[in-house]
Amino acid sequence: MNITEAIRKRKSIRNFKKDPVPQDIIREILETACRAPSAMNTQPWEFTVMTKAVLDSVRKGNLEKFRAGEKPHSEHSVTGWPPDSVYRRRQVELAKQLFHLLDIKREDTDKRTKWLERGFRFFNAPAAIIISADRVLAEGTPVFDIGAVTQTVCLAALHYNLGTCIQDQGVMYPEVLRKYCNIPDSRQIIIAIAIGYPDWDFPANQLETPREPLDKITTWCGFG
């Protein structure tokens, strides 16, 4: 698979097989991902990789807080689209596509809640990667670089027939991650990546999300 094929093939996986991902494979993926660009080679990322009992404890801790009604409070804002904006419209359309595939009706609050809980469970992935950055960096400074390394992780995973889902739900209760993964307060928890072997029989994994036509979002300057 060449790089163009990988970019076009990569999609968010929302359910995984139970098969464990070998540590040496995750190591190879992260070593490759560390070649991602960063401002002046600052490489502001740090990885925390969870599996087995630790990941199960984080899943349980997330669900306990969610079911108790505790409002999510991630350390880095990754959502917040203005009402009536094109960004909110795209998000709503994605939800409609997913709920259609999963046969979740708009009025079925029980199924909608259970779907929401899947994100706090890292979509049943056998492993998850948490990416954090040193708080000594100015607010927002490392975000571009974190995005670059995150995408590179997801593309590198395809080489090993692994799927990924970049997800903010995994970091919405940062105190749970700090408790079970010993992430120090000196690091800001940014984003999570669920990783594992895709369960292709799961309906949501059949989703193909649309993209805006290039000419709608591109201005060409100086071309003949």
Image (spheres, helix red, strand yellow):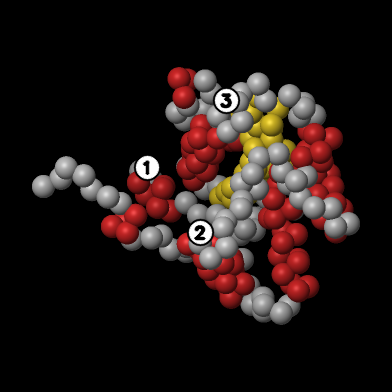
Q: Where does label 1 land, which residue?
A: 3
Residue 44 image label: 3
Identify the residue at image location x=60%, y=26%: 138
Indicate the position of residue 177 as horizontal and vertical percent values: 78, 38
Cα gap from disc 2 to disc 1, whole angstroms:
27 Å
Residue 87 image label: 2
**What is the three-letter code of the residue carrying label 1?**
Ile
Above or below 37: residue 16? below
Disc 2 to disc 3: CB gap under 8 Å: no
Q: Earlier in the sequence, mark 2 or mark 3?
A: 3
The reply to whether residue 26 is visible in this rendering is yes
Q: Earlier in the sequence, mark 3 or mark 1?
A: 1
Q: Nearer the viewer, residue 193 or 22?
A: 193
**What is the three-letter code of the residue carrying label 2?**
Tyr
**What is the three-letter code of the residue carrying label 3?**
Pro
Above or below 39: residue 111? below
